[in-house]
Amino acid sequence: MGLRFKYNIVLVLACVLGIVAATGMSYWIVQESAVQDVEREINLLRANATAVRSYTLNSIDPLLSDDNDILFLPETITSYAARTVFSIFRQQFPQYSYKEAALNPTNPADLPNELETSLIEQFRADPALDQLSAIVEDNGERFLTVAFPVTINQPGCLRCHGNPEFAPPAMVDLYGSENGFGWELGETVGAQIISAPMSLVDERAQETSIILSSALVAAFIIVLIATNIMLSRIVLRPVARMSQVAEQVSLGDFSIPEYAKPGRDEISSLSKSFNRMRRSLESAMKMIDE
Ligand code: HEC
């Protein structure tokens, strides 16, 4: 096995390992930071929903709540307003979703699915939790789902979610007296659950990895070519020349011209030492012949 072959095998192996490790790591790092970007998007959506809720509570509800005893208008309900505004937003961004799920919801549309139920249960078990997230796959697409607990902090909520006997009768007429009641002060009854698509994030992570690995492969090819040229010029060719001369001299043929590699590196000094040795050998032979 030639020196060049051994050198190239080691170099290729080391570079392939390096490129695979660097690409894998960059994919992971980009994904991590991209998940944070999607989380920020979700926090913006939540802030918007909170703004819709407080607008409904402070500006709409006082105008219409008197009518609620006769004809219940769900438009005055914060949760209804947040959901309705979001459903309009979804017409442009169908991959995003917003839900105020409750274990015992007033509106059956707010019933939690399996994942949502488990998130709500986790909030109920640990009141210190203020956010939970999960990555969900749906039809081959990945979504980041972030949940925030909904806890009954104001006694006013119990007017409509406490005992159905004291709830606005028009509301009971509309929603029935079975669901969405019996909530208690301080209880975590549900969660605000927002999902955003991860497809952009995944694409970005892939693109970055492809760019990085191409750059590394290009750098590796340049290193491979440059070091092979150097190896040839500095080591392989001079050594081949010296070995050819040594071969002839060993057969007693001193007619072959001396070879001295120019420069001051180890191979140059070896070629000069070899020439001195050859001259000594030549004069020793001559002395014997005489
Ligand atoms: C005037 C009556 C009323 C009051 C007061 C009220 N809600 Fe509701 N709430 C409703 C109705 C009606 C719905 C169902 C709206 C819909 O159709 O989406 C609802 C829905 C919800 C939902 C979504 C889950 C579900 O039950 O469908 C949550 C969470 C919620 N309310 C929490 C609260 C909290 C917290 C408060 C106090 C800050 C509160 N509500 C005050 C009437 C009320």
Image (cartoon, rainbow, N blue to C red):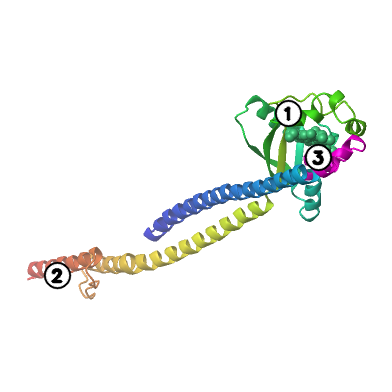
Q: Position of residue 179 (x, y in %)?
A: 84, 28
Residue 146 lies within the magenta run = no
Measuring from the top left, give residue 268's x and y in whole percent: 23, 68
Q: Amino acid at mark 2?
A: Arg
- Residue at x-position 80% and y-position 42%: 62
Left or right of 70? Residue 245 is left
Amino acid, disc 3: Ile
First-in-chain label (3 vs 1): 3
Q: Nearer the viewer, mark 1 or mark 2?
A: 1
Q: Quadrant of the N terminus?
A: bottom left
- At a point 71% along the width and 25% down the height, the residue shown is 185
Specify whether tag 1 is near ligand 1 (CB below 8 Å): no
Badge 2 element: helix
Q: Residue at x 81, y 26 (%)?
A: 181
Asked if the residue under mark 2 is in contact with the one under mark 3, i.e. CB atoms within 8 Å, the reply is no
Q: Is residue 80 magenta?
A: yes
Image coordinates for residue 121, horizontal then vertical, percent: 69, 27
Q: Quadrant of the C terminus?
A: bottom left
Query: Mark 2 or mark 3, which is nearer the start of the sequence?
Result: 3
**Range drawn in magenta:** 62-82
User: From this viewpoint, is residue 1 visible?
Assistant: no
> Badge 3 is on which residue?
77
Circles 3, 1 touching at the beta carbon (< 8 Å): no
Q: Which residue is identified by label 2?
A: 279
Q: CA distance from mark 3 to mark 2?
A: 106 Å
Among the 4 quarters of the image, the one containing residue 107: top right
Q: Is residue 165 above or below residue 106?
A: above
Q: For residue 155, which numbered disc appears in the image?
A: 1
Q: Is residue 213 above or below residue 254?
A: above
Left/right placement of residue 135 relative to residue 12 reads: right
Please state which of the two labelled residues, at mark 3 or mark 2, is closer to the viewer.
3
Judged left or right of residue 107, residue 190 is left
